[in-house]
Amino acid sequence: MVVKVKTRDRILTTSLALFNELGEPNVTTLLISDEMDISPGNLYYHFRSKSDIIGELFGQYTAEMDDLLAIPPDVEVSLDQLGFFLHLLFETLERYRFLYHDLVNIMSRYPDLKNRFRKILSRKGKGFRSLCDSLTRQRLMSLDQSSLDALCEQLTLTVCYWESFDSLKELGNRNAMDPARGVYQVFYLLMPHLTESAAGELTVLAQEYRR
Amino acid sequence: MVVKVKTRDRILTTSLALFNELGEPNVTTLLISDEMDISPGNLYYHFRSKSDIIGELFGQYTAEMDDLLAIPPDVEVSLDQLGFFLHLLFETLERYRFLYHDLVNIMSRYPDLKNRFRKILSRKGKGFRSLCDSLTRQRLMSLDQSSLDALCEQLTLTVCYWESFDSLKELGNRNAMDPARGVYQVFYLLMPHLTESAAGELTVLAQEYRR
DNA sequence: GTCTATATTAAGATAGAC
DNA sequence: GTCTATCTTAATATAGAC
């Protein structure tokens, strides 16, 4: 049975694809409607403005991230599970990568995104804190307070900007945009803080993510 | 004696200031000329296009970075000198921060910047490699090949995006945009790879950069 | 819900006088 | 070298018919 996808939803998925591919500022409402073979007027029937489309996509991004980052403070994660979590995280960030590609521009044109961006940033930091706490409880990791703060900061920065950095470095390469490369990088960020046996285990695991 | 600064140079410094403050896409040629109290026509007498202004500013950025990153492969740096170098590096990156704030947008509209961006990126990586090699020769640091690669990658990513990340986190805070914060962060990236005594020394040094 | 046609605005850039 | 006036282009958004 063929299900007709609602035009409103098609606008969102088409916009997201174009934003990621060409950069949000380079995507006009006309281009979106052209790509979908609908009229520009029709697009404006479903969304009052381009910023409404962006706001809704940002809402989707936030919802998915909140879901991922809802880490119970008392959970114990294995290194395997950590890798899986990171993979999902990078995969989600890649699907909404346009947001971080022109951050200042987007925030200045849609000012209410500023606070929403900061909120999700602090949530990432707290998520990493929970994970590090778990590793510490399991005696896989041992860190003083300052180092732990700096590490969580570093982890947050890295997940936010890894995709931008990697795609700049690999401009046009086929192995670009593989979430595994991000996971590998984060593993090496954690490695030096782990106990010897945990570090050994993580080194082996890292090979699976190497590309 | 009052020296009249050439209009052409004033255009560059005014543009740079406005780009950094408001984001390049939000700065029109009219705004630049307004700010300088010259006519838009005059601006176009000195520069054929807005992209020429950006190209020239990028040239300045590249020249300054090349200067900084010209690290002789056999030099031995102390941890003090390393801190000084990092401070200069972050200071320069902050003066041209607009470039990284809307990277994809800027690269798509001025396509010849793409390769110039990649070149400067690889030069940063090589600079960090030289510094790590020096620390290794002095037996302050010891790392296997994979870890060294990942560390240099991480250092490069961090210097490129630290300012963006920090200003997003500190939106509107007064302690935002202090190069010292970046130095502190990079110190903590190196710390776990140093020998015990070097790590101790760096911890002390880091306090001077803490804000 | 969807279309075509058009209004509005603003940016980058040029022409020609002084 | 600098000005004023204007051209050109293109993007967001609306009006009104179907």
Image (cartoon, coloured by chain):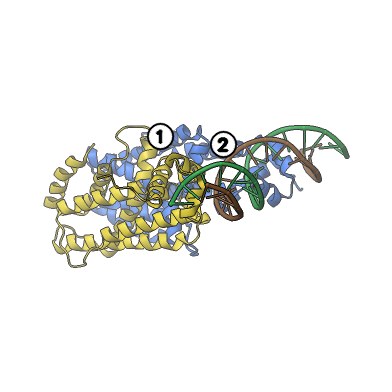
Chain colours: A blue, B yellow, C brown, D green
For image coordinates 66% across by 34% down, the residue present is: A48
Do we see residue A34 in this rendering?
yes
Q: Are marks 2 and 1 on the same chain?
A: yes
Q: Quadrant of the C terminus of chain B?
A: top left
For image coordinates 28% across by 59% down, the residue present is: B147
Looking at the image, which residue sits at the far left? B197
Q: Quadrant of the N terminus of chain B?
A: top left
To which chain does the residue with label 2 belong?
Answer: A
Q: Where is mark 2, residue-wise?
A: A55
Left or right: where D16 falls relative to A65: right
Looking at the image, which residue sits at the far bottom? B74
Whole-percent x, y for residue A195 in the image? 24, 50
Distance Cα–Cα, label 2 vs label 1: 28 Å
Choose top left, top right, bottom left or bottom right for residue A199. bottom left
Q: Nearer the viewer, mark 2 or mark 1?
A: 2
Q: Residues within 10 Å of mark 1 (few under 14, many from 20)?
A: few
Q: Amino acid at mark 1?
A: Pro
Nearer the N terminus, badge 2 or badge 1? 2
Left or right: where B135 falls relative to A22: left
Query: Which sits in the foreground, B120 or A162?
Result: B120
Whole-percent x, y for residue B192 in the image? 22, 51
Q: Where is mark 1, residue-wise?
A: A72
Whole-percent x, y for residue B75 in the image? 17, 64
Do we see residue A99 in this rendering?
no
Whole-percent x, y for residue A173 in the image? 48, 64
To which chain does the residue with label 1 belong?
Answer: A
Q: Amino acid at mark 2?
A: Gly
Q: What element does badge 1 sit on?
A: loop
Q: What element does badge 2 sit on?
A: helix
